């Protein structure tokens, strides 16, 4: 059995370093594929030994993000002919096996029933509670410093596949009609892990904006990348008002998993996806995850 891990990066040295160091614990770097959207000199040092695929970055245009992900779709589908499993994640996402089942991520993936073609992990976001946690210390493991998580269905992505597959934009949803949600795999979304870091990162993205021919703003990326600086700061501050373990269910996501399974339908675009929902009640990360990365 063989497993390939793929990501795409632009101006994200911090997350690329984390991504490479994490996955290279489980497999040889020759099984890691890093697509750089334009020249990214830092990638050749951080991802030394990985497969680095540098692609052209054209001048900004409205459908840049959609075209970028079409490249991802075609590359991963090609790799499916050479690997048993292909895993694609954005560079600020990590696929995590519940430590209760051990530390062998590759062995777990290899043990998935061969009849299961596509698998989705449960998406959880790491949130920085600045009122309760210190600023991020890069000399320490992230999960030794951050313990507050929330479920976000947007990141329950069908990111493990045994077959050539067409994903929706940014990997949200796919053309595959069968939904298999893993009971043991999590997709940790790390964008919000440190308030000052993600505010600075958002400002960098705002600075990338272009102008359409009619003079209107050309915004790259979806969701929070398009928010104004004021709106982004307001939403970040809203996280401070989230409750913590109000439901009393801890890291048990039985209800959320059932909702995901029930809601999986084919949308107007032709892609299958689940309801999008987020949980405003934060869960505390169990000790078994601490220090994992």
Image: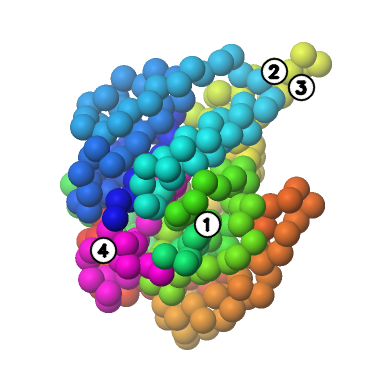
Q: CA distance from mark 4 to mark 2?
A: 48 Å
Which tag, 4 or 1, sits closer to the chain's start? 4
Which tag, 4 or 3, sits closer to the chain's start? 4
Say whether residue 3 is left or right of residue 246.
left
Residue farthest toward the bottom in the current orientation of the protein:
248
Q: Residues within 10 Å of mark 2 (few under 14, many from 20)?
A: few
Q: Position of residue 18 (x, y in %)?
A: 29, 44
Q: Which residue is mark 2?
A: 211
**In which quadrant of the rendered image does the C terminus lie?**
bottom left
Among the 4 quarters of the image, the one containing residue 45: top left
User: Which residue occupies 53% across, 35% down?
Assistant: 74
| Foreground tag (4 vs 1) | 4
Is the residue under label 3 in contact with that under label 2 (CB below 8 Å)?
yes
Vertical arrangement, residue 282 with respect to residue 258, above or below: above
Q: Is residue 250 visible?
A: yes
Q: Which residue is mark 3?
A: 216
| Numbered mark located on residue 71 in the image | none
Q: Position of residue 207 (x, y in %)?
A: 55, 24
Boundaries of the magenta span: 87-113
- Callout 1: SS: loop
Q: CA distance from mark 1 to mark 2?
A: 34 Å
User: Which residue occupies 59% across, 45% down?
Assistant: 166
Q: Which residue is mark 4?
A: 107
Q: CA distance from mark 3 to mark 1?
A: 35 Å
| Numbered mark located on residue 158 in the image | 1
Q: Residues within 10 Å of mark 1 (few under 14, many from 20)?
A: many
| Foreground tag (3 vs 1) | 1
- Callout 3: SS: loop
Q: Nearer the viewer, residue 226 or 95?
A: 95
Is the residue under label 2 in contact with that under label 1 (CB below 8 Å)?
no
Say whether residue 91 is left or right of residue 204.
left
Which tag, 4 or 2, sits closer to the chain's start? 4
């Amino acid at each position: 059995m063989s497993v390939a891990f793929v990501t795409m990066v632009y101006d994200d040295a911090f997350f690329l370093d984390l991504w490479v160091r994490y996955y290279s614990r489980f497999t040889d770097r020759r099984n890691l594929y890093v697509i750089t959207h334009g020249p990214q000199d830092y990638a050749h040092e951080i991802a030394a030994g990985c497969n680095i695929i540098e692609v052209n970055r054209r001048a900004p245009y409205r459908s840049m993000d959609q075209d970028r992900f079409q490249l991802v779709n075609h590359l991963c589908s090609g790799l499916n002919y050479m690997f048993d499993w292909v895993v694609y994640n954005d560079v600020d996402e990590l696929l995590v096996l519940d430590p209760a089942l051990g530390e062998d991520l590759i062995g777990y993936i290899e043990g998935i029933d061969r009849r299961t073609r596509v698998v989705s992990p449960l998406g959880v976001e790491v949130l920085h509670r600045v009122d309760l946690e210190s600023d991020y210390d890069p000399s320490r493991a992230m999960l030794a410093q951050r313990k507050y998580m929330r479920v976000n269905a947007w990141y329950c992505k069908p990111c493990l596949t045994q077959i050539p597959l067409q994903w929706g934009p940014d990997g949200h949803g796919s053309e595959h009609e069968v939904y298999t949600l893993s009971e043991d795999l999590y997709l940790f979304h790390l964008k919000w892990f440190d308030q000052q870091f993600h505010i600075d990162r958002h400002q960098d993205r705002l600075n990338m904006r272009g102008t359409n021919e009619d003079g209107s703003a050309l915004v790259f990326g979806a969701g929070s990348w398009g928010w104004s600086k004021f709106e982004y700061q307001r939403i970040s501050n809203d996280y401070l008002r989230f409750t913590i373990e109000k439901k009393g269910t801890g890291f048990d996501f039985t209800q959320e998993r059932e909702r995901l399974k029930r809601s999986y339908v084919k949308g107007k675009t032709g892609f299958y996806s689940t309801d999008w929902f987020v949980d405003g009640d934060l869960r505390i990360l169990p000790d078994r995850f601490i220090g994992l990365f």
